[in-house]
Amino acid sequence: MLKFYFSGAPNPMKVALFLEEAGVAYEAIPVDTRKGEQLSPEFTKINPNQKVPVIVDGDQTVFDSNAILIYLGEKHKKFMPDAKYHGEMLSWMMFVASGLGPYTGQAVHFRNFAPEKIPYAINRYAYEAMRHLGILNDRLAKQKYMVGDQYSIVDMAVWGWVRLVPFALGEDAFAKLPNLKRLVDEISARPAAPRAIAIKDKFTFKAEMDDEARNNMFRHLKVKVA
């Protein structure tokens, strides 16, 4: 059975959504990042980058959420755009992986978790996150889904981060992104979405963002590189 190493963060939730949508049998294995379980030698063996999600599918180990979505989509032949959209699919998956996710993640960090409120950093990452979100919103003004005319892994990849826009950018941010909110609301209303989100509720994760959690999640606090 496929093993799914996860937490309740945006990237693992993309994969959880696919697994629930596609009806793939899996074993959910929690990795409590606030306790530092991602730093263990055992986990580092399957992902040297020490981040979730990871899947172990027989003799295949795949890390990075968008790589996992592509792997699962190709293997199970589900939620993949038509072949004529293959280039678009790859482009938008990489857009999410290299742009939307990192910038939104940094916006969340500097807005909500950084020990110092640095106006330059908050503005920089909020601007870039909104710029990437605006590109998605403009595309969805022209078509219902991100690639082609059917719900696909690209929409799942977008959903993982975009559903947290209010936390990243404030409660009023969605007012500027009506097309994107329409997609996220549609996906969140699908039966698989609440099942995916509820996976974490079967386990106990550390809730406190205390010194232990900050040191485990934000390693630069302990290791100065400059």
Image (spheres, helix red, strand yellow):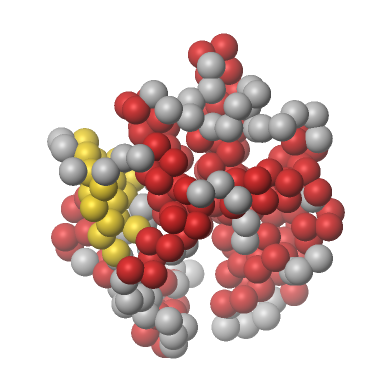
The mark tally for this picture is 0
Q: Say which residue appears at 62% left-offset and 76% top-offset.
A: 112
Image quarter for residue 50? bottom left
Q: Is residue 84 left or right of residue 31?
A: right
Q: Say which residue appears at 61% left-offset and 67% top-offset.
A: 108
Q: Say which residue appears at 28% left-offset and 56% top-offset.
A: 28
Image quarter for residue 220? bottom left
Q: Quadrant of the N terminus?
A: top left
Q: Is residue 42 left or right of residue 115?
A: left
Q: Say which residue appears at 76% left-offset and 69% top-offset.
A: 171
105 w.r.t. 114: above or below: above
Expressed as whole percent of the image width and height from the top left, the position of residue 192 reads 47, 48
List the single residue furthest toward the front: 191
14 w.r.t. 136: above or below: below
Q: Is residue 66 left or right of residue 189?
A: left
The reply to whether residue 155 is in sight is: yes
The reply to whether residue 107 is in sight is: no
Q: Choose between 114 and 153: the one closer to the eye.
A: 153
Expressed as whole percent of the image width and height from the top left, the position of residue 126 reads 72, 61
146 w.r.t. 181: above or below: above
Image quarter for residue 85? top right
Expressed as whole percent of the image width and height from the top left, the position of residue 9 reads 47, 62
189 w.r.t. 156: above or below: below
Expressed as whole percent of the image width and height from the top left, the position of residue 225 reads 43, 68
